[in-house]
Image (cartoon, rainbow, N blue to C red):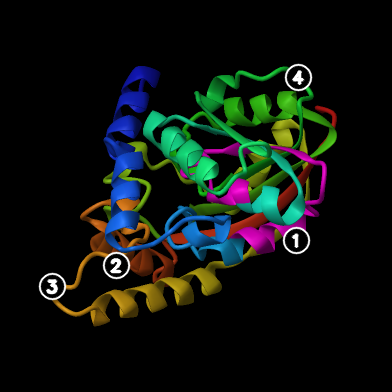
């Protein structure tokens, strides 16, 4: 797929016009007041297992006060705000979708974290940052849409400081194919660029990253998704939509959740934690 076509297809898949206004309206309608980053936990982490997974990855990666972090595919900024509030990091988020960036900035203003987090719209394959800017690059469910992973990993190597850390929580291909669609990251195979774990490690090594931790967390993700499915099935007919990730995923939320469960059960996808250190090329 040509780059322009890829960007158009990706933008179309994730487009959520007036997302910030939608979130604000849903919160007002539900009578929810946002004063703390904890108040947005139900909808601002667009990945499996939400904040539990974010905290697990932070522990594995040794996040601590004073680190400068780049959050790839930052979405609504939930992980960025958690890393700032709970670990004392300064976080810069980047996302292709302007509406996600606008919503992330709005929520950060609401909770008073604009001194620790910032967001910008941009292309991860041509990061608009100087070399050696960040201590850690953070990526949760981002790589599945990237075909040119080698280009991305070279960009990450460039913007990381010496001995910097790459923290990953990513979906990878399982042993069975094809995948069931639609899923959260793709309506069909045209923007789904999953590779399996060994292939991903090879690409990272070529770009100059040495693994410290590589853990499979598929079972926990399957259990989490099965619980979500049960809760969705138990909602009374006619009940107002929850203030949750359905506001971001849209009307196909239930179908995408069902297919993700099937893909996890049938080993069509797996989920991994990875913590890698920047090393010299070659």
Residue found at x 43% / y 59%: 33
Q: Please tell me whether mark 3 or mark 4 is closer to you in this view.
A: 3
Whether residue 172 appears in this view of the structure is yes
Mark 1 residue element: helix
* Residue occupying image coordinates x 55% and y 61%: 38
- Eye-nearest disc, 3 or 1: 3
Q: Is residue 95 above or below residue 189?
A: above
Q: Are marks 3 and 2 in contact (CB under 8 Å)?
A: no
Check disc 4: other Cα within 10 Å, few if <14, some if 14-19, many if 20+. some
Q: Nearer the viewer, residue 179 or 121?
A: 121
Quadrant in which residue 9 is drawn: top left
Tell me if residue 180 is in the magenta stretch: no
Find disc 4 in the rendering and name its residue: 131
Residue under numbered circle 1: 59
Q: Earlier in the sequence, mark 2 or mark 4?
A: 4
* Residue sitting nearer the eye, 207 or 158: 158
Q: Quadrant of the C terminus?
A: top right
Q: Earlier in the sequence, mark 3 or mark 1?
A: 1
Q: Is residue 248 left or right of residue 54?
A: left
Q: Does residue 68 show up magenta in the picture?
A: yes
- Residue 151 in percent (x, y) is at 59, 25
**Quarter of the image where the N terminus is located:** top left
**Count of all numbered marks drawn on residues in the image:** 4
Residue at image x 57%, y 62%?
A: 51
Identify the mark at residue 238; answer none if there is no mark.
3
Label 2 – label 4 distance at C-alpha: 42 Å
Residue wearing tag 2 = 258
In the visual, does 190 lie left or right of 72?
left
> How many residues crowd around disc 1 within 10 Å: few (fewer than 14), some, or many (20 or more)?
few
Which stretch is magenta?
Answer: 54-81
């Amino acid at each position: 797929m040509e780059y322009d076509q890829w960007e158009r297809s990706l933008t179309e898949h994730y487009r959520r016009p007036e997302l910030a206004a939608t979130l604000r309206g849903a919160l007002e309608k539900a009578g929810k007041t946002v004063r703390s980053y904890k108040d947005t936990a139900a909808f601002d982490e667009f990945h499996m297992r939400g904040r539990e997974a974010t905290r697990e990855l932070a522990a594995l990666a040794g996040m601590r006060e004073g680190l400068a972090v780049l959050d790839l595919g930052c979405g609504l900024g939930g992980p960025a705000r958690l890393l700032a509030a709970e670990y004392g990091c300064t976080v810069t988020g980047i996302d292709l979708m302007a509406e996600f960036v606008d919503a992330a900035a709005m929520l950060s203003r609401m909770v008073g974290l604009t001194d620790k987090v910032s967001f910008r719209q941009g292309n991860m394959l041509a990061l608009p940052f100087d070399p050696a800017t960040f201590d850690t690059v953070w990526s949760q469910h981002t790589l599945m849409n990237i075909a040119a992973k080698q280009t991305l990993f070279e960009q990450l190597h460039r913007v990381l400081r010496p001995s910097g850390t790459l923290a990953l929580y990513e979906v990878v291909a399982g042993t069975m194919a094809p995948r069931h669609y639609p899923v959260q990251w793709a309506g069909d195979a045209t923007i789904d660029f999953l590779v399996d774990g060994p292939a991903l490690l090879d690409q990272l090594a070529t770009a100059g990253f040495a693994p410290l931790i590589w853990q499979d967390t598929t079972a926990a993700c399957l259990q989490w998704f099965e619980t979500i499915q049960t809760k969705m099935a138990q909602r009374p007919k006619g009940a107002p939509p929850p203030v949750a990730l359905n506001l971001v995923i849209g009307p196909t939320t239930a179908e995408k959740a069902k297919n993700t469960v099937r893909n996890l059960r049938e080993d069509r996808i797996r989920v991994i934690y990875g913590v890698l250190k920047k090393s010299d090329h070659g």
